[in-house]
């Protein structure tokens, strides 16, 4: 073997070893449950053979032809895939009464929502980082220069709800900044292992299975099904559960969809817990190639009607490019579908509050002026 070939192979081996070490050792990839906890998951109706599964069989496999078209589309890109200018944000001012007088939901971009309701301050999928990537410096950066509120500005948080462990919903940097300000993290089965590795004490974490409920300071919180998948590394896919959330107080009821393909679970959730004063519904990052795990905007409106939503806020858009549609297509299509179905829809700008159970809610098509 020539010296040049040997050096090349050595460098290649070192690169592979470094990449494997990074994935294995860096905390951004999260933790994993021990054997005893994993065995306990077998009691879950959502657990299959060695991993969690969807109620509706959902294939995530992509054949070579589909993979080729996907790679081609990502290389080519499409016009208007990102806004022509940074999205404006309305800075968030925390309510000192935490929604005791006027409950509200504040969309922070993508699926992150600040919910202040009946004296409780909750954060839903608080991804406030720069990019949904284990290495944010190389991920697709946020459309706005910064979110409407920074993690360091948040304080006195009663509950953080997480829908699943993907990077655009569970952000290592954000959790590290919030962990000492949060009284309780409530998450689907297995997700607590990530939080523990990131320094959240186990006694402040509660894991729930689908259809399990808990109460916190008088608020009923139920983990309900979604049609999706999980995983943060090269291995360990679907070893943690994904879900949606019902948030029910004495006077107000909210549904948070998490990420989900369309299915009969929405109607079942509506039958068990609906109707809802406000729904926060996934609407964005869709593609026919993964239609089983993400809804089209038209399906989003249908799912909102299935659960009994009185007012819908489309989320999972307006922050990152994760699919091959224009950045504002989710809002345009969701508004058209909602109008056709005569379903009320709120379209807040980033940081603009939506008052729960109020006849006055944001309806401006603010995205049309931004290109």
Image: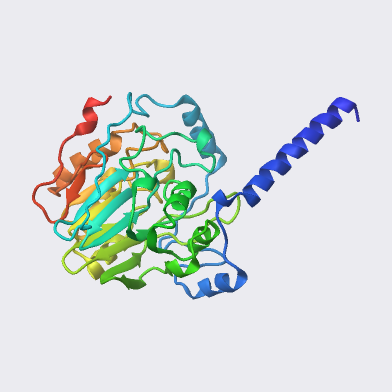
x, y percent for residue 261: 36, 52
Find residue 329 and report its image quarter: top left
In this view, the residue in front, 364 or 260, is 364
Q: Residue at x 39, y 68 (%)?
A: 210
Q: Residue at x 26, y 44 (%)?
A: 92
Residue 70 visible to the viewer: yes
Q: Residue at x 52, y 53 (%)?
A: 231
In this view, the residue in front, 273 or 247, is 247
Residue 170 visible to the viewer: no
As drawn, the residue found furthest toward the left would be: 359
Where 288 sits versus 235, above or below?
Answer: above
x, y percent for residue 339: 14, 43
x, y percent for residue 296: 32, 44
x, y percent for residue 74: 48, 31
Where 167 sits versus 211, above or below?
Answer: above
In this view, the residue in front, 179 or 40, is 179
In this view, the residue in front, 68 or 144, is 144
Where 73 sits versus 161, above or below?
Answer: above
Q: Residue at x 80, y 34 (%)?
A: 9
Relative placement, left or right, of 227 versus 309 is right
As drawn, the residue found furthest toward the right would be: 1
Task: Specify the quadrant that holds the N terminus.
Answer: top right
Task: Specify the quadrant that holds the C terminus.
Answer: top left
Q: What scheme was used to colour the molecule?
A: rainbow
Number of marks present in the image shown: 0
Relative placement, left or right, of 110 versus 57 is left
């Amino acid at each position: 073997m020539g010296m040049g070939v040997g050096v090349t192979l050595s460098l290649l081996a070192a690169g592979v070893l470094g990449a494997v070490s990074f994935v294995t050792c860096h905390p951004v990839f999260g933790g994993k449950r021990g054997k005893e906890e994993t065995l306990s998951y077998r009691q879950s109706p959502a657990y299959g053979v060695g991993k969690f599964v969807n109620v509706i069989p959902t294939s995530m496999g992509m054949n070579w032809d589909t993979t080729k078209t996907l790679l081609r589309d990502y290389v080519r890109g499409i016009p208007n895939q990102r806004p022509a200018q940074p999205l404006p944000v309305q800075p968030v001012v925390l309510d000192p009464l935490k929604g005791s007088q006027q409950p509200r939901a504040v969309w922070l971009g993508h699926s992150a929502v600040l919910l202040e309701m009946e004296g409780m301050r909750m954060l839903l999928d608080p991804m406030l980082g720069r990019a949904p990537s284990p290495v944010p410096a190389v991920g697709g950066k946020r459309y706005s220069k910064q979110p409407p509120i920074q993690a360091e500005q948040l304080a006195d948080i009663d509950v953080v709800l997480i829908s699943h462990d993907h990077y655009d919903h569970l952000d290592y940097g954000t959790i590290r900044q919030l962990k000492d300000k949060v009284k309780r993290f409530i998450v689907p089965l297995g997700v607590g292992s990530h939080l523990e590795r990131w320094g959240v004490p186990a006694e402040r974490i509660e894991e729930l299975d689908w259809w399990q409920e808990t109460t916190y300071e008088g608020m009923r919180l139920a983990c309900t099904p979604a049609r999706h998948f999980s995983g943060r590394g090269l291995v360990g896919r679907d070893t943690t559960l994904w879900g949606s959330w019902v948030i029910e107080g004495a006077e107000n009821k909210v549904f948070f969809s998490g990420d989900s393909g369309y299915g009969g679970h929405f109607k079942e959730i509506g039958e068990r817990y609906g109707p809802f004063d406000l729904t926060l519904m996934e609407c964005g990052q869709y593609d026919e190639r993964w239609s089983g795990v993400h809804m089209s905007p038209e399906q989003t409106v249908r799912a909102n009607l299935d659960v009994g939503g009185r007012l819908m806020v489309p989320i999972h858009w307006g922050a990152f490019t994760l699919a091959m549609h224009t950045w504002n297509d989710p809002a345009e299509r969701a508004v058209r579908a909602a109008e056709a179905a005569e379903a009320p829809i709120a379209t807040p700008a980033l940081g603009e509050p939506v008052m729960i159970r109020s006849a006055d809610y944001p309806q401006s098509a603010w995205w049309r002026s931004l290109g």
